[in-house]
Image (cartoon, coloured by chain):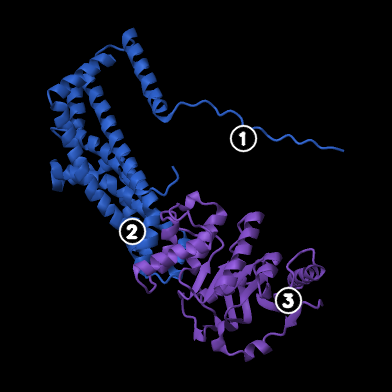
Amino acid sequence: MSAVLKATPPPLRQASLDAARCALSARGVSRRFRIAGTDLVALAGVDLDVAAGEFVTILGASGCGKSTLLRLFAGLDRADTGTLLHAGVPIAGPSLQRGLVFQEPRLFPWLTVTQNVATALLNAPGGPEAKRLAVAEHIALVGLAGFEDAWPHQLSGGMAQRAAIARGLVNGPDVLLMDEPFGALDALTRARLQRELRRIWERERTTMLLVTHDVDEALLLGTRLVVMTPRPGRIARILDLPRSITRDHADPAFARLRAEVLAMLDDGISTEGPLQP
Amino acid sequence: MSVSITLPRAAAGPRAWRLPAWPAALLLPLLGLLAWAAAARAGWLTPAILPAPAEVWATLTELWQSGELQSHALWSMGRVVQGFAIGAVLGLALGAAMALSPRVEDYLRPSFVAIAQVPVIGWVPLLMLPLGIGEALKIVIIAKAALVPVTLNTLAGIRAVPRGWVEVGTAFRYSRWQVLRHVVLPAAVPPVFTGIRYGLTSCWKALVAVELLASAEGLGFLLVWGRQMFQMDMVIAGMVVIAAVGLVFDASLALLERRLQPWRAA
């Protein structure tokens, strides 16, 4: 195992963390779906803690339950067993304190960029002037200044996803949950948005939880990496990704780390079982 | 070994030559007019059956100058506006209620679909008994003509709102009413408008049919009158006006649709 790769033994150390200090926490979370007469175990006993200010990336092949976990944290779905907490409080439904970015931008085509970002503020506290300022600020934050009045059909895929990120952040949430937000973008746009997301996180220090199936994206963005394996969906490994890691493919240590993570994903798929830490 | 790559030129190639929209739209009617004039001139049919375009034009101007045409057209348009307004409002309410409540749909949809199967004209003999052959009958028939397409398109339009958009509202803690007001209804505007346009067209068609059956005024009556007098020029003049008014109705709604939906790509 590489020197930079520090495996965190979950859930021992995790469980000792004070729940209130954790932005998000999952304990023994299971979720199954009945699809065409057969039970699909999307999540089987998942434990995860995300501390405030962290950037956690969840990496896994399709069907590993990573999106299900994110939707549970978002409050868009209910767990069959286990508990999900946000700042120590059970998650019972969506909250404006947990922003959400989907794989598709999901902008409303009948609203301009400004109006789309403002949809997130409909039930938020604060006066219209404060909201107007917040919308303008967040549009500038994602680099869309000058496109405030554009219609969604006039935006490129990358620009639309920027607007969606602004909409997810405009409430100033504790946590931003992202479900493969760059999955549908071309490689160049994706790389640019990844850098910008990292910059936004460094500036705002919003806790980030990002789901992806892209190893490079997971390693590039996260301060901690959660590797999940499918059938049943569970966490195989949690790795710290200290800032000291050079995130460069030419760096041998990084290349090794990447290879190891890929091997973990491969194992999870071929043995159909979790990798014990 | 060198490899030469030839880029396909299709994208930069010349576009097929095309008429702009307006002249293109007029091309077919013009050809029809020419064929009609040629047929009349060659005497393929007797003038009593197929009068020349000039004769129809003369009849049209005559009817216009006497004010008869305007009066008939106004009668017809008045009926359509009333019947369409009733049918469209009911259709919007019914379609929305069925789309939003599975229970309402369970109760109403089968009967509604069954009723929709009977063509507008099929209702006339039955409705004549309670309603007589006066204005009430015509308004009800026209309203029914609008009701069916407006209801079905509203139902389908609301049903087709992507779940993902509704979820965006849910994620921002929208209430049921807020989801309806800010997501579902705006998203359903394009398909609902299609239903409204289609509804108006079927109203206009139903109107002429009803006026053919029982009326002493209106454009449909003009056709009946012309046929009874064996004045084919009047029949054709009536048909031309019916088509023109219908076209204007549809174009007005299309204009309104564009005004209401500035977000749609031009």
The disc at residue B11 is 1
- For the residues tagged 3 and 2, is the chain the same? no
Q: Chain of mark 1?
A: B
Q: Residue drawn at (20%, 23%), measured in percent from left and top?
A: B227
In the rendering, at what x and y percent does residue A227 appear?
Answer: 69, 74
Q: Residue drawn at (33%, 56%), measured in percent from left and top?
A: B95
The disc at residue A133 is none
Judge left or right: residue A94 versus residue B240: right
Q: Pointer 3: what residue?
A: A273
In the rendering, at what x and y percent does residue B264 appear?
Answer: 43, 47
Q: Pointer 2: what residue?
A: B96
User: Amino acid under label 1?
Assistant: Ala
Question: Could you classify mark 2 by the number of other residues whose Cα lies within 10 Å: few (under 14), some (14-19), or many (20 or more)?
Answer: many
Q: Is residue A188 above or below residue B135?
A: below
Q: Which quadrant holds residue B26?
A: top left
CB contact under 8 Å: marks 1 and 3: no
* 1 vs 3, front mark: 1
Colour of chain B, in one word, is blue
- For the residues tagged 2 and 1, is the chain the same? yes
Secondary structure found at label 1: loop
Q: Is residue B51 visible?
A: no
Nearest to the observer: residue A111 or residue A32: A111
Q: Quadrant of the N terminus of chain B?
A: top right
Colour of chain A, in one word, is purple
Q: Chain of mark 2?
A: B
In the rendering, at what x and y percent does residue B32 appear?
Answer: 37, 20
User: Amino acid under label 2?
Assistant: Ala
Q: Residue drawn at (61%, 35%), measured in percent from left and top?
A: B11
* 2 vs 1, front mark: 1
Closer to the chain start, of discs 2 and 1, is: 1
Secondary structure found at label 3: loop
